[in-house]
Image (cartoon, rainbow, N blue to C red):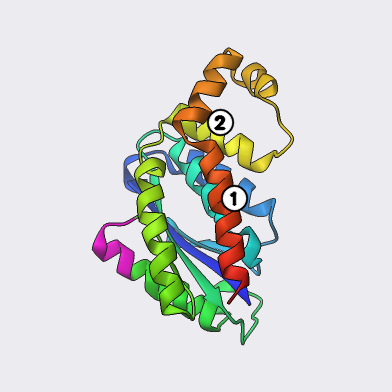
Amino acid sequence: MIAVITGDIINSQQTDTEVWITRLKNLLESWGSTPQTWEIYRGDEFQLKCNIDEVFLRFLAIKSLIKSQENLDVRIAIGIGEENFLSEKITESNGTAYVNSGRLLDDIKNDGHTVAIKTSNDSLDRDLNILLKWSSKDFDNWTMATSEIIHEMILNKDITQEDLAKRFAISQSSVSQRLKRANYDLIVETNLYFRKKISEL
């Protein structure tokens, strides 16, 4: 089983494409090569495949990166399933992971949510999607400053609050407050819960 993330940038037409697309490409490149592992297409849509135990933090790394840009957000559909056909281009590969992710993105565009997950287990989907709806009330309201801190914490597990304070030229107490406001400890717990539930599929 693999995870496929399909997403699109919200408000992409109202901002400088070069800034966000360069940062997004750099992030995706740190996880694999294009076009087999990831691809950006139609201007503001993208697809990425990864291991199932990495998917929650990959989603949050992308979310925090995009939210750190003014007026931008991202819609993300997470599909968990098989990969039955592997092409040189991810957008031409196939299997239930790809189908689940692609169809789900269309659904969440219509229902107004910014993230959802689809697996082969309807009961698990219900549980995880309720969790994502609740947690998105936090994620969707991250400020640019909070998003920057969260992004660094996700990508650099060993980074300290002192390191972050130096990087962003703020006090260590400001870093602590931003992490508290973002419920970072709860994010760590939620990731562990996601990994456990998906591993049981």
Depth order, front residue of 177/2:
177
Q: Secondary structure at mark 1?
A: helix
Q: Amino acid at mark 1?
A: Lys
Q: Which residue position holds label 2? A: 149
What x and y, as percent, mark residue 151? 57, 38
Q: Is residue 112 magenta?
A: yes
Q: Residues within 10 Å of mark 2 (few under 14, many from 20)?
A: many
Q: Secondary structure at mark 2?
A: helix
Q: Is residue 54 magenta?
A: no
Q: Using the image, determine if residue 129 lies above or below residue 95.
A: above
Which mark identifies residue 153?
A: none
Q: Using the image, determine if residue 18 lies above or below residue 2.
A: above
Q: Predominant secondary structure in magenta?
A: helix
Q: Amino acid at mark 2?
A: Ile
Q: Residues within 10 Å of mark 1 (few under 14, many from 20)?
A: some
What x and y, as percent, mark residue 157? 70, 39
Which numbered disc flags the more N-terminal residue, 2 or 1? 1
Q: Which residue position holds label 1? A: 25
Q: Using the image, determine if residue 72 lies above or below residue 190.
A: above
Query: Residue 128 appears in which quarter of the rendering?
Result: bottom left
What x and y, as percent, mark residue 181? 44, 29
Q: Residue furthest right?
A: 158
For residue 119, say whether it is visible: yes
Q: Give the left or right position of residue 70, taking residue 95 as reference.
A: left
Per the rendered image, the range of residues in magenta is 107-113
For the C terminus, the image quarter is bottom right
Point 55% across, 83% down: residue: 94
Point 52% across, 42% down: residue: 186
Point 53% across, 51% down: residue: 190
Q: Give the left or right position of residue 162, taking residue 140 as reference.
A: right
Depth order, front residue of 75/171:
171
